[in-house]
Image: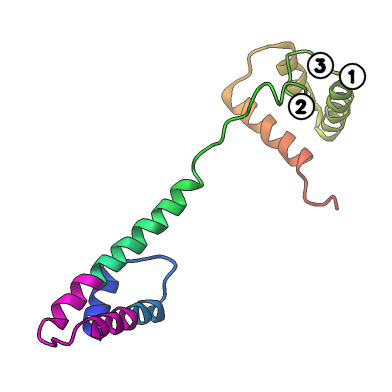
Amino acid sequence: MNPIVMKLMKQIRIRTWKIEDYLQEGMIILHLLLEEQSDGQKLHTKFKVKYHQRLIDELRRSYAKKRSHDHFIGLDVYECSDWINSGDTSPDNEVVFNHLLAEVYEGLSAHYQDLLLRQMRGEELTRMERYRLREKIKAILFSEDEE
């Protein structure tokens, strides 16, 4: 029965399983087949079919688990209306924004400070200027050296 197990292991790959898992499943299926029938002639064929079906079922189950995490559960707007931003800024948000803006502005060189001011005024920056400014800001805000 091992050659059947090894061949099907190569054909149907279950990511979380190791060789021992395939062999153990094969032994379980062989044991079940031996308990339910005494005819040894068709045992080889029945084992192959039943083991193949078991691997396919397990593969489908693993894909179903993966898909279940992909579904987004929507928010109930009425339950979350107190914290959904309606466009008005609260004093708390303004304080945090101004603090972060001052921290970012102080961390930038003179050239990037000028780029930030131009961006905030609504002036057009080149794609490379926007990218470099964004990277500098991310480096300041998400620096690893703070603990």
Q: Is residue 77 left or right of residue 32?
A: right
Q: Measure the alpha-carbon separation of dots 1 and 2.
A: 31 Å
Q: Are marks 3 and 1 in contact (CB under 8 Å)?
A: yes
Estimate the x, y position of residue 143 in percent, counting from the top left. 78, 46
Residue beneath label 2, please? 111
Mark 1 or mark 2: whose residue is earlier in sequence: 1
Specify start and end residues of the magenta stretch as a single range: 26-50
Q: Are marks 1 and 2 in contact (CB under 8 Å)?
A: no
Location of the N terminus (image quadrant): bottom left
Q: Amino acid at mark 2?
A: His
Residue beneath label 1, please? 91
Residue beneath label 3, please? 89
Q: Amino acid at mark 1?
A: Pro
- Residue drawn at point x = 21 percent, y = 78 percent: 47
Q: Amino acid at mark 3?
A: Thr
Residue 12 in sight here: no
